[in-house]
Image (tube, helix red, strand yellow):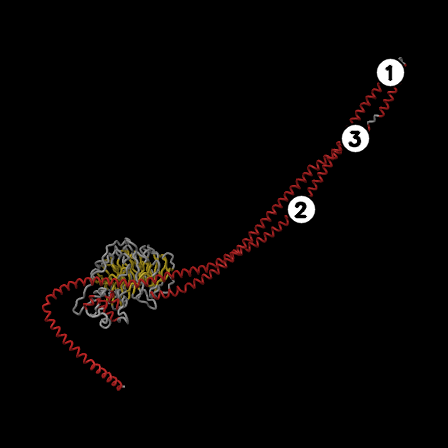
Amino acid sequence: FESACLNCHNADKKKGDLDLSNFSGITAGGAGGTVADPGEGASSILYGTITHTLEPYMPPRGEKLSKKDADLIRDWITGGMLENKSSKAKKPSGPKIAKLNVDPSARPEGPPPMPEHLNLEPSVTSIRNTVVNDMACSPWAPLLAITGQKQILLYNTDTLKLAAILPFPDGFPETLSFHPTGKYLTAGGGIAGKSGSTYTWDVTTGNMLMSNGREFDSVLAAGLRLDLGGVALGGPSRLIKLWDTQSGEELKSIKKHTDWVTALSYSPDGVLLTTGDRNGGVWVWEAHTGNEFHTLRAHTAGITALAWRADSNIVGTASEDGQVIFWEMNNGNQVKKLTAHGGGTLSLDYARTGEFVTSGRNREVKIWKSDFTLKKSLTGFSEMIVETAITYDGKRVFTADWNGVIEAWDANTFEKLGTLSGNPPRIADRIARLQHEFEAAPQSSAAARKALETAKKGVKVAEDSLATAATSIANQKKKVSALQKETAQLATALNQTNASMESLGKSIQEKLSVALAQVQARSEEHSASLVAGTAELQNLEIAPLEAEEKRLAQQLQRLSKESESQPEDTALKNQALDAAKKLADYRARIVGMRMEITEAETKVRSLQNLVGAIAAERSEARAQLEKSNEELQALSSSRNNITIEITAAKSSLAAANKELILRQSALKQAEENLVSRETSLTAPKARLQKALRTEKALREDLNFWQAAQVNAKALVVTKKRDTLKDQQDRETTELGSLTSKLETSQSDLSSLESRKAVLQAQLDQLSVEMDSLRQSITTRKPLLEKAEVESRALQDRYLELRK
C-alpha cells in the first residue's frame, strides 16, 4: 500500500474517503463502503480494483500492482485480514445467500433465470483460444456456461449470442455447475499449485454472492447443494471439503480418494453427493453429513465426468477407460454399462429429457436416448472433443475441442448451427470491426442490387420476347382459326353443292327424264293413234255410198214410178220395195258413216290437240331438263371453284399451321429463355437477400454491442451510484454519531471554560515562540539557499574531476 496507494489514500488526503495507511482505515473502507471482508480474498473489491478486474482501476494511471503484491494482498484478505502476528482471523460478516426450500422436480416459478443486461466486456482477451475446462447448461433456461481465461462466459443457447461475462477473481476457472433451479452458477478454480476457491453468482444479476474454500491448489470440482446451505469442492489435495455457506466455515474434510478429485456433483434433490478421482474411484456421500453412502467400483482409469439424471435416481460416471456406467442409488448397482469411446471417455452430460451426450479421445461425440441406445454419432472432428453439454430440453448439443473451438449442433437433425467464441474480443474491438463491416456492407448490397437489376432487365427482355411470341402465336392462331373456319365454310359449301348436284341430278334422273320419257311415250302413243285415226278417217269414204244412195234413190224413183204405173206388177212392186229397203240401208249406213267420220274427226282433232299439248309439254320438259343441266353445270363449275378454294385454303392452313409450329417453337424458346433468365435471377436475388440480411445482422449486432458498451458504462455508473448511496447512508449514520459526540464535546467544553484564561495565556506564549521560529527560518533561508548552491557546485566539480 505504501509504495502504490498512499499518495491518494492517506490520513490527510483520503481520496474516496479511503485511508490505506493504517489497519483501521482499511477495515473501515471508503465512500463506497468496505473494500474487503475477511475471507473474501479474490472476490473482494480491493483485490478486483488493484488487479484491474473491477472498476475503478487502481492505481488509475500507470501500471497495476505486480502479481506478487496483488497475491500477497489477496492471501492476507483470504486469511482473515490479520492486523499483526498475534491477531486472530476475523470471520466473514455473514452469509450473502439465504437457504432455500424447493421441490427439485418442479419447474421454478416465473420465467427461466437468464442474465438481464449484464456486462459483456471481457476481463481478459488473448491472441489465441485456450482449451475449455468445463461447460454446463442450465437445467431450466436456454443458457450455457463456458470456462474462459480468468472469466466465465454465458451464452444464450437459442440465439448463440453472448449473454454475460463473469470475471473469475482468482486464476482460472476449472469447473462449472448450475444449481438445480438454474438461478445460481458455481465455479471452482484458482492458480495451480498455489490457491483455489469456489465462487457463486446469481446469473440474473451477475452479482457474486459468495466465495468458499481456501485451497493451496486449484479447485478441480465443485458444486452447490439444493438448499444453498453447502458447497462441496475437491482437487489435487485428494480431499472432499464441505463448506457451510451460512457461516463461511469448513464443515468437514473427507479423506477417501487416493488421487486427485476430478469430478463432483450433488444430486438434483440435494440428498446425495457423488465424487470421482483420477484413479477411477467413485463414492457417493450423504450431502448434508458427508457420511459414506455407496462405493461404486468398476472403472479402471480416471473419472472424467459425473452426471445425475433429473429424477436423482441414476448417476452416470465417465472414465478414461472408455466406459460410461450408470448406477441406481437404492443399492448402488449398475443399471447400464456402455463402451462409449475407444481411448477414453472425456465428457458426459444429461438433459432433463433423459437423453445424454458423451465425447472421447476417438474424436467422436455421441448422443444417446434415454433408454441408453445410441441416437447419433457425430464424427469428422479434427481434434478430440474434451467437453460437451446438452440443453435442458435435449434439442441442442455443444462441443469444445482441444483447441478451444466451441460448436453448436442440432440434437435431432445433427446439423451444425454455429460457433461460439471462448475468447471474445473487447466491445470496442467488436464495434470497430462491425462498423468497418457495416460501412462496407452497402457496397456489397449495391453490387448485389446492381447485379439483380441487370438480371431483372434480362428477365424483362425475356418477358417482352415471350409476350411478343405469345402475341404472334395468338395472331397466328386467329389466322389459323379463320382459315379453319373458311375451310370449314368452303367444305360446307362444297357439301351443299354436292348435295344440290346430287339432288338436281337425281331430280333430272328421276323426274325430268322420266317425265320426258313419259311425254315422249305419250306423244308417240298419241301420234300413232292420230295416224291410225287419220288413216281410219281416210278409210271412211262416204262418196261411194252417197253415189250408190243417189243411184238407189234414182232406181227407187224409177221403180216407184214404174210400180205406180204398173201397180199390178208385183215383181216390179217387190223390186221397188227391195230398192226402197236397200236405199234405207244405204242411207242408214251413210248416217252411221257420217257419225263415224264425225267421231273420227273429233278423235283426230282431240289427238291432234293432245299431240300438240304433249309436244308443248315435251318442249317444256326439254327446256326444264336443259335448265337443270345448266344449273347442274353451274353447280359443277361452282364445285370446281369451291374445290380449288378449299385446296388453296388447306394449303394456306397448312402453311399457317407450319408457321404456328414455328412460332410455338419460338414461344418455347422464349419460355425457356425466360426460365433461364428467372433462374439466373435467383443467384443475384439470393446474393442481395444475403447482403441485406448481413447488413441487417451487422446493424443489429452493431446496435447490440453499442448498447452493450453503454450498458457496461452504465453498470460502472450504477455501481458508483450504489457506492455513493452506501457512503451517504454510512455518513448519515456517522453524522448522527458525530452529532452525539458534538453534544458531549459541547458539554465538556462548558466544563473547560474555567481553564480558558490559562490556556489562552499559554497559547499567546506559543504564538510568540512560533513567530520567533518563523523569523529564524526566514533569516536562515537565504543562507540555506546559498549553501545548496555551493553544494551543487562542489558536486558538479567533483563529478567533473571524477571523469
**Residue 532's disc number:** 3
State the CA–CA distance, disc 2 to disc 3. 52 Å
Decide if residue 91 is on the left or right side of residue 377.
Answer: left
State the CA–CA distance, disc 3 to disc 1. 43 Å
Evaluate whether residue 7 shows in this view: yes
- Residue 97 drawn at (x, y percent): 23, 59
Decide if residue 630 is on the left or right side of residue 772.
Answer: right
From the image, which quarter does the C terminus lie in? bottom left
Q: Residues within 10 Å of mark 2 (few under 14, many from 20)?
A: some
Q: Nearer the viewer, residue 561 or 728?
A: 728
Tell me the mark number nearer the camera, choosing from 1 and 2. Answer: 2
Q: Residues within 10 Å of mark 1 (few under 14, many from 20)?
A: few
Q: Nearer the viewer, residue 407 or 86?
A: 86
The residue indicated by pointer 2 is 640
The residue indicated by pointer 1 is 574
Secondary structure found at label 1: helix
